[in-house]
Amino acid sequence: MTFSELQVPPLDTARRLAEHGDLDGAAAILSELAADPEEPDRAQAAVGLAVVLDERGDPEGARAAARVALATGHPEFAAQAACHLAQGFEREGRAEQARGAWQAVLGVGTAAYVPLARLALARLAVLAGDYDEAENELRAALAAAGPDDVGAHAAQQLAELLLERGEPGEAAEVLLEALEVAPQDEVARLRVQLGIAHLELACAEFAGAVEDGGDAPTSGLAIELLARTLPLRGRLDDAGRVWTYGLEHEDETLAAEVRLRYDRDT
C-alpha cells in the first residue's frame, strides 16, 4: 500500500474535525477546497463550509459559501446549497430572498429537491395570503413527489387548503389518491384528514336537505344531524343557530319534530 493510499481525503478530515467540535479546523480545510476552481470536490466542500460557518455563527460567510456551491451547477450540491440559503432566509423572516432561493432549487432541477422547494414556495404563498399560488405550488409538489413522506405531506397540506377554501369534495379526492400510494406511517394521518373532509361534505349535504324543504321527519332529521355534526368541526355557534332555526320554525309540525330530537339529549 502506497503512502498516497494511506492519506485521508481532505473532505473526510474536515468532516471528522467538525464532528469532534473543531469547527475552525474544518472551516480551514473546506475554505481551501472551495476556493480552488479546479478542485473536483469544490461544490461539496462549499456546502460543507456553509454548514460549518452557520454553526460558528457566521451567516453571511455561510451564504457566500453556499453561493459558491450554487454557482457550480452541481446537480446534488448546488441544490443543497440553494436549500441552505432558502432555509436561512426563512429563519430570518426574509420571505422574498427565501422565495428566490427556492426558485433557484427549481432552476437546478434535481428531482429529489423539487417537491421540497414547491412545498416551501406554497408555505411562503400562504404567509403572503396568496392562496391561489399556494394551491398551485402544492399541486405541483404533489405531481413531482413520489410515493413517499413528501408526497403525503403535500397531499395533506393541499387538502387542508382546499377545506379552508370550502372545497371538501376536492380535498377528499386528493386524499383518496394519496392513500393509494402513501407510506404506511402516513396512512393514519391521511385517513383522519379524509374523515374531516367527509364531515364537511356531510354538513353541506345536511344543510342542502334543510334548504330543500322536505317533509317534517326528513327536515327534522337533517337539522338534528347538522346541529350534531357541526360541533365536531368546532362550530358550536353555528350548531346553536341550526337548533334555533328548527325549534322556532314557522312550520309547527317541523318545530315539534325538532323539539323531540333536541329534548331527548337534554
Image (cartoon, grey):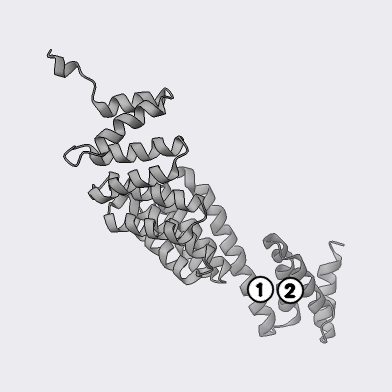
Tell me how far mark 1 sits from mark 2, CA to CA: 7 Å
Q: Is residue 35 left or right of residue 27?
A: left
Q: Tell me whether the residue at label 1 lies in contact with that at label 2, contact meaning CB atoms closer than 8 angstroms.
A: yes
- Is residue 254 in view from this perspective? yes
In this view, the residue farthest toward the bottom is 250
Task: Count neighbours of disc 2 (C-alpha within 10 A) and say few if under 14, some if 14 to 19, many if 20 or more.
Answer: many
Residue 79 place in picture, x, y as percent: 31, 49
Residue where numbered disc 1 is placed: 206
- Picture residue at 46% right of the left edge, 52% below the top: 89
- Picture residue at 30% right of the left edge, 40% below the top: 46
Q: Is residue 8 above or below residue 235?
A: above
The label shown at residue 242 is none
- Picture residue at 41% right of the left edge, 29% below the top: 23
Mark 2 falls on what kind of element? Answer: helix
Which of the two residues, 28 or 133, is positioned nearer the viewer here? 28
Residue where numbered disc 2 is placed: 223
